């Protein structure tokens, strides 16, 4: 068995693509347009994320995923980027041998950046 991808429902695909490309350095792998939906697969640091946009309202179902974390080389650089883009983040804190921050995506999906200290 191999890992496939993480699917995230989004309300505005263009806004989400801009966020994922600017903040997470995502690269588009595949972009499927259907009459009632659009599916965009992204490579984010070796992890495949599928953005799912459907016509109509965004249906959110509660689930077990708390957040999505990405390892970064420089937390300071990422915090500067978030500030430039007007994205608020938590105060940095040290957990074990890592320093972390949390921030929200355009549809309230929660992200974590993790840097070794």
Image (cartoon, rainbow, N blue to C red):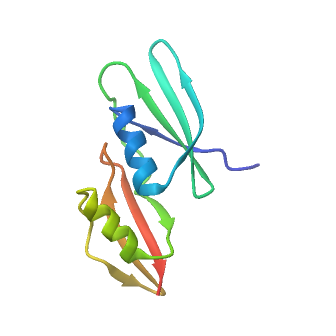
**59 lies above or below 22:** above
**116 lies above or below 58:** below
Q: Position of residue 73 (x, y in %)?
A: 51, 75
Q: Position of residue 56 (x, y in %)?
A: 32, 19
Between residues 102 and 74, which one lies in front from this camera angle? 74
**96 lies above or below 108:** below
In which quarter of the view is residue 84 placed?
A: bottom left
Of all residues shown, which one is farthest toward the top? 35
- One can see residue 64 in this view: no
- One can see residue 103 in this view: yes
Q: Measuring 49% from the left and 64% from the top, which residue is drawn there?
A: 70
Q: Measuring 56% from the left and 25% from the top, which residue is drawn there?
A: 32
**83 lies above or below 57:** below
Q: Position of residue 24 (x, y in %)?
A: 46, 56
Q: Position of residue 41 (x, y in %)?
A: 57, 38
Q: Measuring 48% from the left and 87% from the top, which residue is drawn there?
A: 97
Between residues 110 and 80, which one lies in front from this camera angle? 80
Of all residues shown, which one is farthest toward the right? 1
**Disc count in the image?**
0
Q: Measuring 32% from the left and 29% from the top, which residue is drawn there?
A: 58
**Side of 60 relative to 6 (left or right):** left
Between residues 115 and 97, which one lies in front from this camera angle? 115
């Amino acid at each position: 068995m191999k890992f496939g991808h993480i699917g995230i429902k989004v309300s505005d695909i263009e806004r989400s693509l801009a966020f994922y490309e600017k903040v997470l350095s995502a690269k588009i792998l595949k972009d499927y347009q259907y009459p009632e939906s659009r599916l965009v697969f992204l490579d984010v640091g070796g992890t495949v994320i599928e953005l799912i946009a459907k016509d109509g309202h965004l249906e959110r179902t509660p689930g077990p995923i708390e957040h999505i974390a990405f390892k970064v080389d420089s937390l300071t650089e990422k915090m500067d980027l978030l500030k430039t883009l007007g994205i608020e983040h938590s105060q940095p804190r040290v957990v074990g041998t890592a320093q972390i921050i949390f921030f929200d995506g355009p549809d309230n999906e929660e992200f974590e950046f993790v840097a070794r200290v």
